[in-house]
Amino acid sequence: MTESDPNAGRDEGVSTLAKQGSITFAGNVVNGAFGFAIVMLMTRFVSPSVYGLFVLATSVILFMQVFANLGLPLAIDYFVPQYLDQGEHGKAKGVIVQVTATVLVTSSLVAFALAISAGYIGTFFQEPAMQVALLFLSVTIPMLAIYNVLLTSYYSIKKLQYRVIMRDLVRPTVRFAVTAGLLLIGYGLLGLIVGYVVGLFVAITIGAAVFVYKAWDLLTAEIELVAPAPLVKYSVPLAMTSVVFVLMGHVDYFVLGFFLDSDNVGIYRVGYMLGSGLMIIFNSLSPVFKPLIAETRDDIDLVEQRFRIMARWIAGITLPVAIFLSLGASSYLAVLYTPQYAEANVVVTLLAGAFLFNVTFGGPDGSLLQGLGYSRIVFANTLVLFGVNLIVSFALVPIVGIEGAAIGSATALFLVGGLTLGEVYYLDGIHPFTRDFAKVVGAGGPAIVAGAPVVYFLDSDIVIAAVLPIVVVGTYALTLIATDAFTDEDAQMAAEFSPTLRKWLPSK
């Protein structure tokens, strides 16, 4: 760098990743807090069997809505950034309008089909009450289609603060308030369903109004319809990917519901939710990471640089959380929910390690591969993800119960994370492994050594839950400082989060 141009050599994509990532992180924290609060509310006012029935019903809805939108919303945050970068606002608007019109029609048809077949699905799972739940929830399928269109529209214009308003503030707040009110007056399963529907409806209404207001220049441009072939060519593999990916995310519940009682589904869901909480950092950076990769996909050196920065930050923030969640799984389950859910401790430990590995190297949805345009490879990976999970879960759940489902998910996540690493290296020579990355991972060793005695010597779950994060995170941070693990890119990222934080990070 020179004194005349202090910004020379800076990748502005790093600043965008940090700035927008910090916005989505704040939103994800709020959304995650509400998510845990809602589940804590449910587990205290309804039995594990009722909660498990609700999980099964919403899993069916989330699976069916993937067929409803045909994967087309995923085309928005791939094509729109490119058209906007080229100054073709009319085509960008055309993509959004064409996708919206299409998914409205297809999602309505799927919702009608689900309503008709609700009774058969309830019979399959041997849960008669599931028919009523699916009839009420079927209206959310077209709602979810529009919801996903709005989300990817926010991603495409890199204005994720608007997504935060809709997804992370409005929806969980309304859902929590409505669900709490109905549970307090004794509505049980119906209260869970109504809270889910009302929260989604209010979020879409406010989200659409904000998007129209904030993206007025884009929406008032003269529309220019684009050829459907490129949209379909890109979206269809990702549609199939989404089908398999969503099914993979819920296949555990389907397998458990088939072999075991609904209360086992509820207990497993709590453990899965705690273990998958590690996705928060990846989910904060991924929405802006994919467009950043898509707009520079021909510059492989820049793509690799951005991938390495993202991998280090995800690993650096996620690793200490994975350590204290794994060490204190029983205590966190007992404190956050009730002691009967502590039997999901092995589920939390297995999934924490698997999600840590997977999100560090591109995530279960293959956002790096998507940004590079390899949608068919993403589809193939997701088939592997689903197939391995299904086979292992079917084999182990009848033998070892809910731990069998966790082993299935963990095996699949580790396998696909490894496949992604091999594929991007084979196709473009990209990999995240550097000395600085090794320092970030290696700092986990001392953190484990420091945290283990806390669990072993302390008896109180509340004390363990409070002390363990302090010990683990503190040891991890001190190790990073001792090994001089911070880079100039870290300082640039930190400056976008907080100028004060930037001053504490040494640059090389």
Image: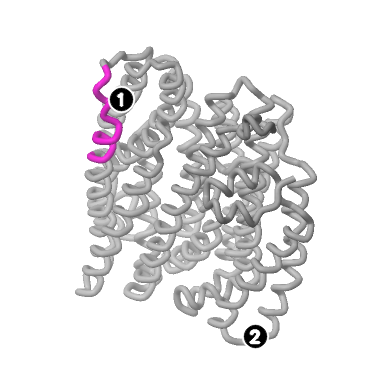
User: Looking at the image, is mark 1 or mark 2 nearer the viewer?
Assistant: 1
Where does the N terminus fall, quadrant-wise? top right
Q: Residue at x 73, y 61 (%)?
A: 444
Label 1 belongs to which residue? 218
In the picture, measured across the screen, residue 487 lies left or right of residue 112, that is: right
Which residue is at the front of the view, 220 or 507? 507
Q: Which mark is residue 458?
A: 2
Query: In which image quadrant can residue 463 be found?
Result: bottom right
**Residue 176 as seen in the image, left or right of residue 313:** left
Q: Residues within 10 Å of mark 1 (few under 14, many from 20)?
A: some
Looking at the image, is mark 1 or mark 2 earlier in the sequence? 1
The part of the chain drawn in magenta is 209-221
| Residue at the image position 44 percent from the left and 54 percent from the top | 26
Which structural element holds mark 2? loop
Q: CA distance from mark 1 to mark 2?
A: 58 Å
Horizontally, is 76 left or right of 485 in the view?
Answer: left
Amino acid type for the residue under numbered disc 2: Leu
**Circle 1: element type:** helix
User: What amino acid is labelled 1 in the image?
Assistant: Leu
Q: Residue at the location (67% across, 39% down)?
A: 308
